[in-house]
Amino acid sequence: MTDLFSKFDDLIALREGLLSSGVTDPFNLVMEKVESPTVAICNGRRTILLGTYNYMGMTFDPDVIAAGKKALDDFGSGTTGSRVLNGTYVGHRAVEDALKDFYAMDHAMVFSTGYQANLGIISTIAGKDDYIILDIDSHASIYDGCAMGNAQVVPFRHNDIDALEKRLKRVPEGAGKLVVLEGVYSMLGDIAPLKEMVRVSKANGAMVLVDEAHSMGFIGENGRGVAEAQGVIDDVDFIIGTFSKSVGTVGGFCVSNHPKFEILRLVCRPYVFTASLPPSVVATAATSIRKLMDSADKRVHLWENSKRLHAGLRQLGFKLGTDEPQSAIIAVIMPDLETGAAMWEALLQEGLYVNLARPPATPAGMTLLRCSLCAEHSGDQVEEILGMFAAAGRATGCI
Amino acid sequence: MTERDDTQAKIRGLIDPFNKKGVEISGSTRFAQDLEWDSLTVMDFVASVEDEFDILISMNRAAEIETVDQLIDAVRQLESER
């Protein structure tokens, strides 16, 4: 008998080699208690959280919590049904209305996760003879959406406007074209030149989908994302987003002004063939989204945090993923996995949690310590974080 | 030089900068196994082939191409369909 698991042997060996060096498993951390959006207890130690996607710190907002508790009391713990059968409650409609108001768009469709939103929308709208042109550094959910459909899939070099334009011009005449971009690329925290990319896409007759998962609530005057910040949101056909980052719960969505958008509710399999979100989740999401519309002060503070951390880390001598802070993600580039894991553990010992990111999630085989800031991190906490990086960096020889 | 020779010469020229180990290239050289390219290197290389010949090679198409000869054939076919 061929062991179907033999294909994982290399990864198993890599992992065992790393753990045998005595390092704590970076992919097996348990939080025993969560005190706030920025602090948890890990291994009995108070730990500052700098690796969550809780950008706007909504997870402990009193109004959000109250809405969730009330929905749990009024509607029960789950819907046990698909959105198209018995799984649409008033709360699901209410969160879609909140999204339409937040983005000022005509249609909103809520999925059970952000992953499913990309999977569903991309696989459904791009058919056999259509072309999907996507950035090579796109998220796994985008690639999986492409793989699930049967369109012709053509990647182009990351953030390269010229490479995108060349490929658009080579698509056979008459074929449908979907360009898939992200506002913020979550590994290095860099943003896309959406202004130019949306322009060349439209000039070549393509529809444009932008995943704004890591920018919602924070980037753009109204927190609508990079497309808003660069003034092209009206030319974007589909925005994909998630509730599991700034919104502070779980779920995914697509918003659009396409006049035929609502038909997707009947033909999009990851929407139809799964249970809808629990009533408490959609209630917390709707409350959070409406509060995010009015969070300009928090956006300003989060930018201050991002700029301070970026400048401070650079001053300490760390190599960063971007020359300037472009989002709430600051990626520290590690020379290799061993150093990255040692640095990750040293930071944890100091009382700081960051994400250790590895291929295939990262581009160009990089090992990254990804720091994601929260609007609830105080200025003092950011200084404390820099002190921890200095100590851990010296202890591990990174700086 | 036949047209196929011409395509072959251009493709070998494109392989060179990615052939870090200096592997001897023949028609049966396999990109993944013999050149030990990872998926990102493959995607970078495919992009350079697309730009050289002004064609599109979809990910599905690229996944079916294992050897240098197969790539030459695919490029010639894609050029003729253009």
Image (cartoon, rainbow, N blue to C red):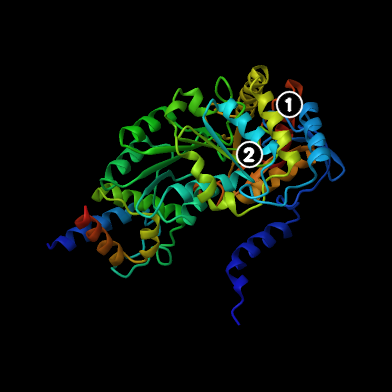
In this orientation, does residue A399 appear?
Answer: no
Q: Quadrant of residue A218?
A: top right
Measuring 60% from the left and 73% from the top, which residue is drawn there? A4
- Same chain check for tags 2 and 1: yes
Measuring 25% from the left and 64% from the top, which residue is drawn there? B73
The image quadrant where one finds the N terminus of chain A is bottom right
Q: Badge 1 is on which residue? A: A377
Measuring 69% from the left and 34% from the top, which residue is drawn there? A285
Label 1 Cα neighbours within 10 Å, binned few <14 / some 14-19 / many ≥20 = many
Chain of residue at mark 2: A
Look at label 2 and name its amino acid: Arg
The x and y percentages for residue A300 are 63, 18
Q: Is residue A53 above or below residue B57?
A: above
The x and y percentages for residue A147 are 47, 56
Image side of residue A220 versus residue A130, left or right: right
Labels 2 and 1: the sequence-earlier one: 2
Q: Quadrant of residue A294?
A: top right
Q: Residue furthest right?
A: A44
The x and y percentages for residue B68 are 31, 64
Front residue of A107/A121: it is A107
Q: Is residue A112 above or below residue A7?
A: above
Chain of residue at mark 1: A
Look at label 1 and name its amino acid: His
Q: Badge 2 is on which residue? A: A370
Q: Secondary structure at mark 1?
A: loop
Q: Residue furthest left?
A: B1
